[in-house]
Image (tube, rainbow, N blue to C red):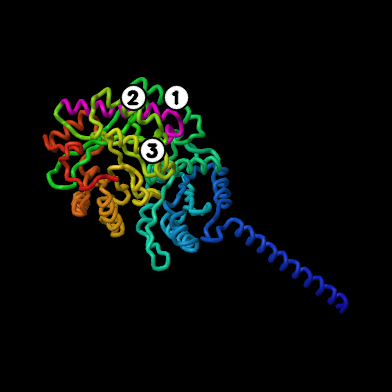
Amino acid sequence: MDTAWIAWTTVVLVTAAAAVALAVVVRRRDRSSARAARTDALTGLGNRDALAERVGRLLAGGGQPGLLLLDLDGFREINDTLGHSAGDALLRQVAGVLDRTVGETAQVTRLGGDEFAVLVPGPVRGQELEVLAKRVLVGLSMGQFTSGPVPLDVQGSIGIALAGPDGSSGEELLQHADVAMYAAKRARAGVLRYDPAHDPHSTNALEVLGQLRQAMEEDQLVVHYQPKVSGGGGGQLLGFEALVRWQHPTRGLLPPAAFLPLVERTRLIHPLTRWVLLTAVRQAATWRAQGLDTTISVNISAATLDEGLLGMVEEALALTRWPAPQLVLEITETAIVVDPDGARRAVQRLRERGVRVSVDDFGAGATSLVHLRGLAVHELKVDRQFVTELMAHPEDEVIVSSVIALAHRLGLVVVAEGVEDPVTAERLRAMGCDELQGYLFARPLPAAEALRWAREEFGARTGRHAAGTVDHPAGEPV
């Protein structure tokens, strides 16, 4: 064979091999770049682009995937207190827990910040997604999260959306899961599935508002009452908290979380507040005529902490001749944080009228006892997230015990809500908690059932703040 031919053939083959090798390297580099573009650098999970790509493939193939959207509670405080490196370390730990919890078929992605998504390929039912979401929250609550030597308690809120009923595109599915997640966070429900009533952008939301106006005119709204009992000796029934419900003609009895978050964004919150206030005080006056004399508590939205609130209160008290000191208005901790000056003015006006004011859900937001020094409030309600886990988490017990002790030093009454078992109740009593509320005693009841329950459980043993029959801490409230 010709030597020149062999040399030329060798050159061609070597050149071809080099070209093939180069092409392989380029393809690998391109695939690696593509993977990197779809990977979250911090956690190693897929990112938002990876989620969109997977959802698109599933929907194009006729699949019905389900989506969980998780947002961590209190992550900003961790970042601000311990620094961003601690926050990053926590996110990596959370990513590991999620990956181990959801199973092999589900895909975990980090969308950014402290938001994670779990995509379940399907076909899957809404109930199955709720079970998975609750398993995720349990996994987080049991996780051993730390920042250096500091143990961290991690909780979250999860929104659920299901392709088909809750969205027909990937973008819509993610948007609806996001709406459900924020509804769960506002309601402190842990897990909620998408409901158009929670979505301020949906046509259904406008329909719900229209239906609610009609419901108020047609007596579809009802008020249920949950008792508050003495934490000290004597076993006194101290009062009831009024909780609004909507007896919807087609959807059944709706809890506040199904419509209040939407109503609070509109001026409809003012007539709704007035209706609940009048209904609750009238019911309390009726009970008094029937021999049951207690306080009545009504929740007040941040949107109604304005000049008109005192007018609503004056109207309710005048129409029923109800004693002002036996009316307790509960304002959320969030309302104080959003507008502290406005809250301070509103509370002062109520106090001058003789109405008692309670700070609801204390500990869930960013308020501290220091911020309460300038507020003329009478009581604190410890947020249920600390009460329900009191016996399981020693740190929660320390927090509740400290809140009770410091609140008493400020002359405040302390109420624990979410009491569900006798062991927790006894521990709270031992800490000196003044009032207890929760399913251990009774769920929220219709008015007639609440009266029957009070007579069966307590007879005539009722106490009133105004009468001074309750063993509350000494000292003038701040």
Q: Is residue 210 above or below residue 374?
A: above
Q: Position of residue 226 (x, y in %)?
A: 25, 37
| Gap between marks 2 and 3 measured at Cα | 34 Å
Please tell me which of labels 2 and 3 falls first in the chain.
2
Which residue is the site of mark 2? 220
- Which kind of residue does numbered mark 3 sit on? Arg
Disc nearer the start of the sequence (3/1): 1
At 42% from the left edge and 32% from the top edge, which residue is drawn?
Answer: 263
Q: Is residue 364 above or below residue 457?
A: below
Q: Secondary structure at mark 1?
A: helix
Q: How many marks?
A: 3
Q: Earlier in the sequence, mark 1 or mark 2?
A: 1
Outermost residue toward the top in this view: 218
SS at badge 3: helix
Give the quadrant of residue 333: top left
Label 2 CA crowd tier, 10 Å (few <14, some 14–19, many 20+): some
Segment tinted magenta in the rendering:
261-289
User: Do labels 2 and 3 touch, CB within 8 Å?
Assistant: no
Most foreground residue, 7 or 332? 332
What number is the disc on residue 210?
A: 1
- Identify which residue, 383 or 347, lies in the foreground: 347
